[in-house]
Amino acid sequence: MKQPFILEDQKIKFKLMGEIQEDVFQKMKPELLKQLRQKLNNATLLVHAEITEETDDPSVRKLYTNSDKFSFLLEKSPALKELQKRFGLETDF
């Protein structure tokens, strides 16, 4: 899991972005807890998940419309603009 986490005494709290991540976390929690307890040699260690709706990172933005998504992809790959022109593609349909 590449999610941020917080260490509080004997507790590790993972910050998850939604219910799907929480479902995955709950499925892997027993094995994760077992591994962490063994590796850290700490039988009292606890693992907890917290769903956070909004991210604290301002660089993460929500993409709602097709135009927003296309603009985001253009930032990553400017060659998409040429493909759009060449094939006459529209972002909104």
Image (cartoon, rainbow, N blue to C red):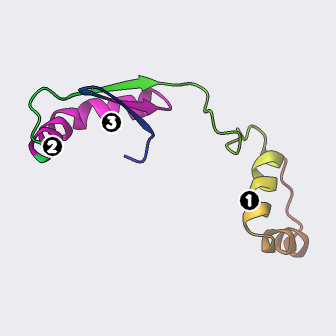
Looking at this view, name the residue that lies furthest to the front.
9
**Foreground residue among 25 and 36:** 36
Q: Which residue is mark 2?
A: 40
Q: Residue at x 44, y 26 (%)?
A: 19
Q: Residues within 10 Å of mark 1 (few under 14, many from 20)?
A: some
Residue stretch rendered in magenta on the structure: 12-38
Find disc 1 in the rendering and name its residue.
73
- Front label number (2 vs 3): 2
Secondary structure mostly taken by the magenta-highlighted segment of the chain? helix
**Which element is circle 1 on?**
helix
Whether 79 is among the magenta residues is: no
Secondary structure under badge 3? Answer: helix
Q: Which residue is mark 3?
A: 24
Q: Position of residue 28 (x, y in %)?
A: 23, 38
Mark 2 and mark 1 residues within 8 Å of each other at the beta carbon: no
Name the residue located 74 percent from the left edge and 37 percent from the top edge: 64
* Residues at marks 1 and 3 touching, judged by CB atoms closer than 8 Å: no
Above or below for 3 versus 53 = below
Amino acid at dot 2? Leu
Image coordinates of residue 57 in percent, x first then y, are: 64, 39
Question: Which is in the foreground here, disc 2 or disc 1?
Answer: 2
Which of the 4 image quarters holds residue 54? top right
Q: CA distance from mark 2 to mark 3?
A: 23 Å
Where residue 55 appears, as percent x and y from the top left, is 60, 33
Q: What separation in Å lies between label 2 and label 1 (alpha carbons)?
A: 42 Å
**What is the spatial separation of the Cα atoms under label 1 and label 3, in whole angstroms?**
28 Å
